[in-house]
Image (spheres, rainbow, N blue to C red):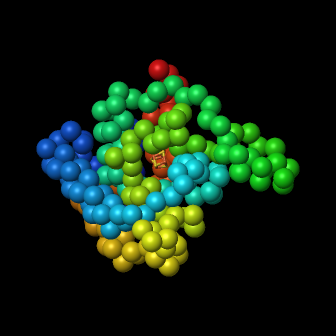
Amino acid sequence: MPGPTRSSSSQRAGPRDGAPEAAAQLAELRALYATVDRALEGWGCEASTDCCRFGVTGREPYPTAIEIAELERAVRARGGLPKRRSLPVVASRRGQRERRGDARGDDAERRCALLGDDGRCLVYASRPFGCRTFFCERARGPVGELADSGLPRAAIADVAREIAALSARFAPADPGPRPLSRASGAWQAQRSRG
Ligand code: SF4
């Protein structure tokens, strides 16, 4: 799940996303998301939410600063994050762990801060580029294509480059992409205080 940066509300290196220029850049980002969504029209998966549990896949998105700003905007727009209840472990994954004698708790799943208790992304329309691109062996294209052979990788790479360039304009001093789990730490802290 590759993807371009982040900034937390306390560490953001770019402009305030309430400023007119930043708002226009966030709109530009959403247009780029629409472009990649169109390129991937017809692609889908079983919506297991495994890719939203970073400990399950061993991977996570690395959003850019501007993508984090868009996530922060979306979290604010929905009034923050709800209190979290436990989410059942996917049965097949639990079985795998039990078979190999893995005694880790559910915390080891490293569930994304933005995954709701209903198994849906709380900010789906604003989810980062890396959450849109189906780099998963279980994804299927419109006529059953596999991700490793059928994904429109050139179109995806073009959008990734455009997002990286846009983020560099949005937050010139930002040090670069960071794991989504690190970026979302501030939201989780707010939730636990709420
Ligand atoms: S941002 Fe949404 S889609 Fe992406 S990992 Fe988190 S919950 Fe899943």
In the rendered structure, the answer to whether residue 21 lies left or right of residue 120 reads left
Q: In the figure, residue 5 lies in which quadrant?
A: bottom left
Question: Is residue 134 placed above or below 19 in the rendered structure?
Answer: below
**Nearest the eye: 27 or 151:** 151
In the rendered structure, the answer to whether residue 120 lies left or right of residue 165 reads right
In the rendered structure, the answer to whether residue 2 lies left or right of residue 57 reads left
**Nearest the eye: 124 or 112:** 124
Q: Is residue 168 visible?
A: no
Q: Position of residue 112 (x, y in %)?
A: 53, 43
Question: Is residue 85 placed above or below 160 in the rendered structure?
Answer: above
Give the residue displayed 50% in from the left and 66% down from the top: 140
Residue lying at the far left of the rendered structure: 20
Question: Is residue 194 placed above or below 109 in the rendered structure?
Answer: above
Q: Position of residue 46 (x, y in %)?
A: 54, 55
Give the residue displayed 50% in from the left and 22% down from the top: 193
Give the total number of marks visible in the rendering. 0
Q: Position of residue 60 (x, y in %)?
A: 53, 55
In the rendered structure, the answer to whether residue 61 lies left or right of residue 53 reads left
Question: Is residue 173 placed above or below 193 in the rendered structure?
Answer: below
Give the residue displayed 20% in from the left and 51% down from the top: 27
Q: In the figure, residue 9 lies in which quadrant?
A: top left
Residue lying at the far top of the rendered structure: 194
Q: Position of residue 186 (x, y in %)?
A: 46, 36
Give the residue displayed 24% in from the left and 50% down from the top: 26
Q: Is residue 70 visible?
A: yes
